[in-house]
Image (spheres, helix red, strand yellow):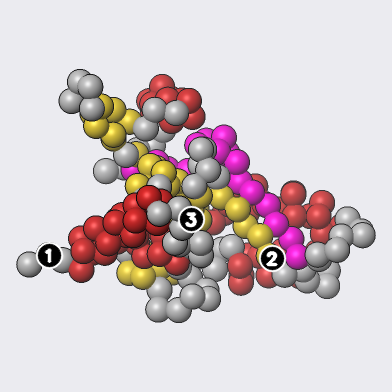
Amino acid sequence: MTSPEAEFAHCFERMYELCRVNGWGDPFSYARSREIHLANKLGHTVAATLSGADAIDEDGECEYKTTVNSVIQATYNGISKQPTWEEQITYLHDDKICKYKNHYFARYKGPIIVEIWKMDCDKVLQHLLPKLEKQFNSTGRKDPRLGVTIPHKYIRENATLLYIHEFQDETSNEKKEESDDETDAITNAVDNLKVTS
């Protein structure tokens, strides 16, 4: 008997391929399906609701950020602006970012998870605060909500690599990692990373 997690992974990949072949676009425009897929991959429990935590890991509720871009990155947007910067810091720490100890960043290529990184909330906040403070103090913004993208360089220098997908080379039957320039940089720098199994 197939496990629910294995069946979900099969259906996820089939649905994506069906939509690609028929030109229907990405059937998962909201990231919930990726959250379920990622939670199953990591052995986490999927959160029961769409608001708040995305999943539950060994340390409690956690945050997921996924991308389909050619490089790993994590976008935090739609952050409510508080009345003062001091209140903003408290909100970010207690209610938005460090409410979840672990933040997981995954890059997808189609239905395949290419790489997964794990970052502590304090490192996330360390990157976000200076950029959010600049936005907080700017005037004339039509949308008062705040947002920042954590770039691949910061993720690779401050997160732990949990997973990297190996693709089968169809010409030589050899396994190889995702072969874009950015992932090649991961492979070349892997000695400097904290990699977990």
Q: Position of residue 113 (x, y in %)?
A: 36, 47
Q: Is residue 66 visible?
A: yes
Whichever of callouts 3 and 1 sits on the residue coming sooner in the sequence is: 1
Mark 3 and 1 residues: CB-CB less than 8 Å, in contact?
Answer: no
- Reply above or below: 159 against 185: below
- Residue under the point 68% across and 52% down: 148
Nearer the camera: disc 2 or disc 1:
1
Dot 2 alpha-carbon crowd within 10 angstroms: few under 14, some 14 to 19, many 20 or more? some
Residue topped by disc 1: 2
Q: Position of residue 120 (x, y in %)?
A: 50, 53
* Distance CA(mark 3)–CA(mark 2): 28 Å
Dot 3 alpha-carbon crowd within 10 angstroms: few under 14, some 14 to 19, many 20 or more? few
Q: Which mark is residue 79?
A: 2
Q: Amino acid at mark 2?
A: Ile
- Reply above or below: 56 against 64: below
Q: Is residue 192 visible?
A: no
Span highlighted in magenta in the image: 145-163
Q: Quadrant of residue 196?
A: top left
131 vs 125, left or right, is: right
Residue 90 lies in the magenta stretch: no
Secondary structure at badge 1 equals: loop
Mark 3 and 2 residues: CB-CB less than 8 Å, in contact?
Answer: no
Q: Which mark is residue 25?
A: 3
